[in-house]
Amino acid sequence: MTTRHTFAVVTCAALVAALYGGRTELRSAPQWRTTNRSALRTVSQEPAQQPTFRLMAEAVSLEVSVRNSNRRTYTGLKAADFEVLDNGVRQEIVDVTFGKLPIDVTIALDVSYSVNGAMLDRLRRAVTQLMRDLGKEDRLKLMLFNARVNRVVDFTQDITVVEKALTTVAAGGGTTVYDTLSVAMVSASAPDRRQLVVCFTDGGDSNSATDPEVLVDVARRTRATVALVMPPLISGIEVRSFQPRTTTMIMPSARGPAAPLRDKLYATVVSETGGSRIGAGSSADLTQTFRAVLDDFRSAYVLYFRPKGVERAGFHTLAVKVNKSGANVLARKGYFGG
């Protein structure tokens, strides 16, 4: 493990410890920027454990979305319909599932000063409806963030708990998008449950301790799929992969001079996790947007393969193909072997 990788793991471990070490109510949750650096001094003295992509009985699980040009899911696909390359080496797919595993959904809502009363009302309705759309074994976690990151409700199936938490939300303060995404991606979840992180934000970040390079590194390590619901991209901007070593810390303004750089950063985060960015303007129907995100995630395949012909340790680059002409394939870009 490189020094940079170790720092990313340690930083995120410290951030999570700082967040979950306190109470979960919004009014008493700790502020990361203050607590993180204190926690980091303690955690960094201990060796960091390498997070790995899930391995069960030596098999790697890989979630894959397969859609046609009309965004309709290809159903009924079998192992023979897929090709998975691990570090360029073709792998044997030993199992394929579709719609069988329960889902843990983490909803992270930006409640900074930029979110007005009408938007808050629409967010409340959207999250409440999403809770109703979950399957009987699915669960939802609610996180709110402004200048602080707060776990308001841990994974639950109780809609009344979520509704009660949403009624007390008041907008204000700065924004910690990078910290929030880092915590959501590394937070523990049962290995036999799929993980979806849905983050609603205007995209600006003014208070995070997590820098862009660390955020990208965490995205490469997480088991979660990230969906970002945020304002549409600036017209004419071509979003390419974020290059951590050539970009400095991004400015706070949501649509200021640094917005194209930040768009590249967010594009990289969703690409690494096999997720998506959904443009949502000020008048967007957030209820339908959240529902579409959940439906897309639910309709993904889960492939299992046992890596052969590659070194076990280190980062493994993945490539997935499907024998359907014109199919749009979406999957995470790789995993860390243990």
Image (cartoon, rainbow, N blue to C red):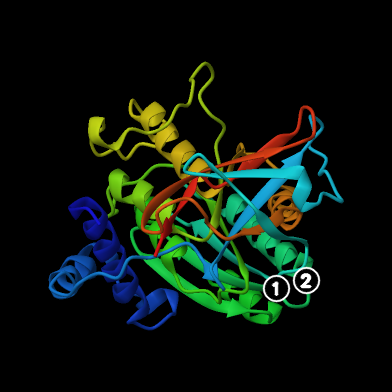
Where, by quadrant of the figure, is residue 94 drawn? bottom right
Q: Is residue 8 above or below residue 230?
A: below
Spot occupied by residue 157 in the image (x, y as percentages of width and height):
68, 79
Q: Quadrant of the C terminus?
A: bottom left
- Residue occupying the point 36% across, 30% down: 261
Spot occupied by residue 168 in the image (x, y as percentages of width and height):
54, 72
Q: Is residue 136 above or below residue 325?
A: below
The disc label shown at residue 135, or none: 2
Q: Nearer the viewer, residue 189 or 113?
A: 189
Residue extending farthest right: 76
Q: Quadrant of the N terminus?
A: bottom left
Spot occupied by residue 159 in the image (x, y as percentages of width and height):
70, 77
Q: Which residue is mark 1?
A: 138
User: Quick check: 179 left or right of 301?
Assistant: left
Distance from the alpha carbon under mark 2 to that under mark 1: 5 Å
Spot occupied by residue 149 in the image (x, y as percentages of width and height):
38, 65
Residue 176 visible from this viewpoint? no
Q: Within 10 Å of the Cα at label 2, are there few (<14), some (14-19), or many (20+) other Cα atoms? A: few
Q: Nearer the viewer, residue 267 or 200?
A: 267
